[in-house]
Image (cartoon, rainbow, N blue to C red):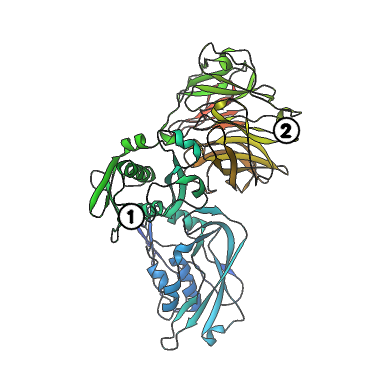
């Protein structure tokens, strides 16, 4: 956190040691906090290598109140599993009642601290400090991230023990607080997986996995933390549309300890008796949830064995997990599709830089209907297209010789910008599109891509939909919504009631994934819980970035800059390149490379 500073009172200067791999960083005395006078900030730790381990130091003998507060705040950013060092800055009673796991408040910088009241309050044996800062996010008790704004203001109260004359904190807010850089160093995002519970799934042979991102402490037994979080159940936001195969009350067996795979990458998970006696199919679904959840953690897990009451329940490998449940990120599309200079649907093999596209089979590629935008079903059997003027929606099969027929839908919007958005297919062959007609704006669903449209209720939507993308799991939807000249990206949940063909569908629990952007111009799903977005901040320039569905920024490099982006598409399979339509035509971004031109054309789209 920087060099030691003078003016430390009676505190012994600390030594700071950092090693790049598996190293240790000792925290102490990184910023001064006056007992009175002007506010000075408590510096947030500069961004460190994520492999550096950080441990705090206990309070010094006869440390003044300013150093007690400072040392406590620094201890919150350490890798101490149970905050034992942080508790040493508290009185015995406060240490018992303080619950750091309740929440984490993330500030743009480390919290500032200032003694309240006139100077010299130390002579009374008690003093209060006010912690301040600008909020940027919170992580709740379920480990769910949410963007936040506004001022942070909390107080900590200190007393001086009459016998030992040592200062300690005796009253403080629950949870922990830290700056953004400390949060990025201490926490990482992981996807838990549950299964879609809406009515569409009932006809499927496999349950559909849905990602539920949470934040865990990066170097405090992350695998064990993640498994415990999975067993606890989905976050409140996702809970209404998913289910868990783990019986209610399932937890790790008492005394299970840290979970670590063996030398064959097999992880044994001992569960309590709530899981005893379950059937094989359900056990395999439970194991699939674990394998999907642990897939990106280190060390690698290739197989999971579940045990309860000392007996094996079942065992499942990564390969078998994909047979037990559907996960969108394992489905690799065959083609990338776009509209050529003749306004027809064409395609090239996914991942290919071949500049010579092939005409897509079927009426949208072989016919004479000019297209503005397209969407292809995830099984690549059907395609939907919006006519060049944005007024008409067509659907046809991707089979040579097929006829197109009459449009499924016609918009009455007066201009192209007031008509139909680019359509989007869900995992169950449902076709979604928004009509932007100001006099009759609505979100529509064509079940199985045909028939009369079902108007989707959006009870808490404030604004007009400008773009629609449904996640592969069929229970989450991304919408670009315009209001008052601003275009924001909202993520919502798809709730279904009734049987297929007689369903009531609505989009609920909308929340912003890009609160800092005021104009989102293009977006696409780019993973199980990630999207790629093109937009600009207030007064800023256009940029392309990745965002998580919870509004956090994933710990991956942003895409290389690209000028004049009008459309962008990504596959759930992150091995396939981003593809965009810009002033240079159709371009692609292979991993570790710069943007490359592919060919002329517009409206690129991977299936979905």
- Residue drawn 67% across and 21% down? 388
Residue that mark 2 sits on: 437
- Residue drawn 68% across and 45% down? 462
Q: Position of residue 245 (x, y in %)?
A: 38, 46
For label 1, the SS is helix
* Mark 2 surroundings within 10 Å by alpha-carbon count, few (fewer than 14), some (14 through 19), many (20 or more): some
Residue that mark 1 sits on: 274
- Residue drawn 67% across and 29% down? 420
Q: Is residue 36 left or right of residue 554?
A: right
Vertical position of residue 383 compared to residue 546: above or below: above
- Residue drawn 50% across and 24% down? 336
Q: Position of residue 290 (x, y in %)?
A: 35, 46
Q: Position of residue 98 (x, y in %)?
A: 45, 71
Vertical position of residue 571 compared to residue 257: above or below: above
Q: Is residue 370 left or right of residue 249?
A: right
Q: Is residue 568 left or right of residue 465?
A: left
Q: Nearer the viewer, residue 493 or 332?
A: 493
Q: Nearer the viewer, residue 264 or 369?
A: 369
Vertical position of residue 235 compared to residue 530: above or below: below
For label 2, the SS is loop
Residue found at the far bottom of this picture: 163
* Residue 467 is at least partly visible in this image: yes
Q: Position of residue 264 (x, y in %)?
A: 23, 43
Circle nearer the N terminus (2, 1): 1
C-beta proximity under 8 Å, tags 2 and 1:
no
Vertical position of residue 595 compared to residue 48: above or below: above
Q: Nearer the viewer, mark 2 or mark 1?
A: 1
């Amino acid at each position: 956190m920087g060099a030691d500073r003078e003016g430390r009172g009676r505190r012994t200067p600390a030594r700071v040691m950092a090693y790049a791999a598996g190293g240790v960083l000792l925290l102490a005395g990184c910023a001064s906090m006056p007992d009175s006078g002007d506010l000075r900030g408590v510096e947030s730790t500069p961004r460190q290598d994520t492999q550096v381990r950080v441990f705090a130091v206990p309070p010094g003998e006869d440390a003044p109140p300013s150093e007690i507060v400072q040392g406590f705040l620094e201890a919150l950013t350490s890798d101490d599993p149970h905050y034992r060092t942080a508790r040493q800055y508290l009185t015995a009673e406060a240490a018992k009642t303080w619950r750091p796991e309740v929440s984490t408040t993330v500030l743009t910088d480390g919290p500032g601290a200032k003694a309240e009241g006139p100077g010299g309050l130390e002579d009374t044996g008690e003093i209060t400090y006010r912690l301040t800062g600008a909020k940027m996010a919170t992580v709740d008790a379920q480990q769910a991230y949410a963007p936040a704004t506004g001022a942070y203001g909390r107080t900590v109260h200190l007393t001086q023990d009459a016998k030992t004359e040592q200062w300690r904190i005796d009253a403080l807010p629950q949870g922990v607080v830290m700056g953004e850089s400390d949060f990025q160093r201490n926490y990482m995002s992981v996807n838990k997986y549950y299964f879609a519970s809406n009515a569409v799934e009932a006809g499927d042979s496999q349950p559909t996995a849905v990602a539920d991102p949470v934040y865990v402490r990066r170097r405090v037994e992350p695998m064990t933390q993640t498994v415990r979080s999975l067993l606890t159940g989905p976050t409140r936001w996702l809970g209404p549309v998913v289910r868990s195969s783990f019986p209610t009350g399932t937890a790790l067996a008492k005394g299970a300890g840290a979970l670590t795979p063996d030398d064959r990458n097999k992880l044994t998970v001992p569960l309590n008796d709530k899981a005893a006696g379950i059937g094989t199919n359900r056990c395999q679904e439970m194991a699939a949830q674990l394998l999907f959840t642990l897939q990106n953690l280190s060390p690698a897990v290739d197989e999971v064995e579940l045990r309860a009451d000392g007996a094996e329940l079942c065992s499942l490998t990564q390969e078998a997990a994909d047979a037990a449940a559907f996960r969108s990120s394992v489905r690799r599309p065959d083609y990338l599709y776009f509209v050529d200079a003749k306004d027809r649907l064409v395609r090239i093999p996914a991942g290919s830089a071949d500049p010579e596209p092939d005409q897509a089979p079927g009426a949208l590629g072989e016919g004479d209907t000019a297209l503005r935008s397209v969407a292809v079903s995830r099984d690549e059997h059907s395609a939907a297209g919006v006519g060049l003027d944005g007024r008409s929606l067509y659907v046809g099969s991707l089979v040579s010789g097929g006829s197109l027929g009459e449009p499924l839908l016609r918009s009455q919007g007066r201009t192209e910008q007031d008509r139909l958005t680019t359509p989007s297919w869900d995992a169950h062959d449902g076709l979604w599109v928004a009509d932007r007609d100001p006099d009759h704006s609505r979100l529509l669903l064509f079940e199985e891509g045909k028939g009369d449209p079902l108007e989707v209720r959006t009870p808490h939507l404030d604004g007009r939909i400008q773009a629609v993308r449904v996640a592969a799991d069929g229970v989450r939807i991304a919408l670009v919504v315009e209001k008052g000249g601003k275009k924001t990206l909202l993520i919502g949940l798809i709730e279904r009631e009734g049987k297929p063909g007689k369903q009531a569908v609505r989009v609920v629990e909308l929340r912003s994934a890009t609160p800092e952007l005021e104009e989102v111009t293009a977006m696409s799903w780019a993973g199980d819980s990630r999207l790629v977005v093109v937009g600009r901040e207030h007064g800023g320039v256009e940029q392309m970035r990745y965002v998580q569905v919870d509004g956090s920024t994933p710990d991956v490099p942003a895409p290389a800059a690209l000028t004049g982006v009008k459309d962008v598409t990504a596959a759930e399979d992150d091995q396939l390149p981003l593809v965009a339509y810009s002033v240079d035509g159709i371009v692609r971004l292979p991993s570790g490379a710069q943007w490359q031109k592919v060919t002329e054309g517009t409206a690129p789209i991977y299936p979905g």
